[in-house]
Image (cartoon, rainbow, N blue to C red):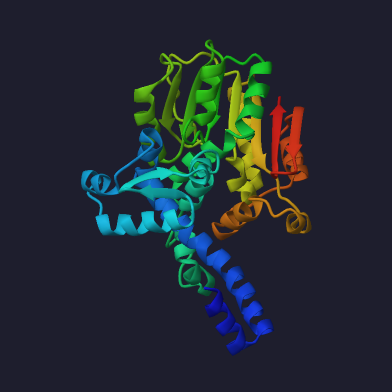
Amino acid sequence: MLSQIIKVIKLLGLSRAVRMKKRHDLGLRYIRGYAACCCWRTLLNNGFLDQLSREQTLDPDRFARDSSLQPDVLEAIVEYLDGIGLLQKHSGLVRLTRAGQDLIAEPRGLFELLWAYEPCFSQLNDLLTGAKEYGRDLTRDVTYVGIGSGRLCEQLPYPVMRRMILEQNCKMVLDLGCGDLALLSGLCRQDQNIRCHGIDYDQDMIHYNQNKLMENDFGGRLTTQQGDMFNLPQLPQNLPPVDCITACDTFHEYLGQQDKLIALFQSLRKQFPQAIFVVGEFCLQDPAWLRKHPTATLEHHLFHQLSNQQIGTAAQWRQLFQEAGLQIIEQQVYDLIGHGYFALR
């Protein structure tokens, strides 16, 4: 190997060889990130990594047969992920490396959320040239938005919101844009006396939730239904009086129609006069701050810009709540992640 390096240096010159290697490594960082992401999320989507995590070792050929997958394609993916250190293959069996175990934990939601917006990236050139338009020609996968967001929100947003809800001694929570029910499921685990009901506009999300509730509905304390929060459906008759209305990362999609949001808050306050509101929302971060601290907020902002969604500043949210006649009784804004939490009455 050393002799080959010496030959390259003699042929190209030391400075040029070093410069080429440095630039190649820079390019490889981004190429590998893209290839690794595609391979990892494909194995996630097809259940390979979940089964591997449960069983610790897995035979790819057997998994391909049992799952009606192409064994040669699976083998290529496994070999690549073995090469970059996320999987380890030995004697025909595969296991997760420590790095792979870490990726399937909290960061998993990042891959699921990116998959939700995958149509925007696979058709990015068409969006750029105007050949296609978001909403008309393509859209995100709402189910994966709910799943990915739910997993990521367990890191901070949901714990903060649950604390606000429980400290107010709320007993009947109505969640608007409930996603995968992760917020409400956590509440039911923490408080054996709380009752929760989630509403989501997307029928596929509701179907996902109904299957999930068949496994555990917390003794009937957690329910869900399809519905439009701007025109609430008839709620189940056996629900206790609603004393808390929650929404996490739901309202920003309508910031372009602030009058509609204000009217929604006013309508909900009239319909549920005893209820408090507990809202978690994205808060726009300054580009200069993000250049110094390039957190996952950069990707999040990109997702929303490509899908024509707006993000408000914390000040904009406060102003909107005030115009809706709501009083802030508690607020926490975390600039580090660009998220704010408000308890309102």
Provide residue 298's location: percent of width, then percent of height. 65, 55
Q: Is residue 66 left or right of residue 108?
A: left
User: Which residue is painted at 61% across and 75% down in the image?
Assistant: 21
Q: Position of residue 297 (x, y in %)?
A: 65, 50
Residue farthest to the bottom, as pictured: 11
Indicate left or right for 114 with 283 as reference: left
Question: Quick check: 208 above or below 145?
Answer: above
Q: Is residue 335 left or right of residue 49?
A: right
Q: Reply above or below: 29 against 327.
A: below
Residue 333: image quadrant is top right
Q: Kindly identify the residue that appears in the image at 58 percent across and 73 percent down.
A: 24
**Which residue is pictured at 56% across the width and 60% down the height?**
306
Percent x, y for residue 31? Answer: 52, 66
User: Image quadrant for the C terminus?
Assistant: top right
Q: Identify the residue at image location x=42%, y=48%.
A: 88
Residue placed most toward the observer, 314 or 2:
2
- Visible residue check, residue 327: no
Q: Is residue 140 visible?
A: yes
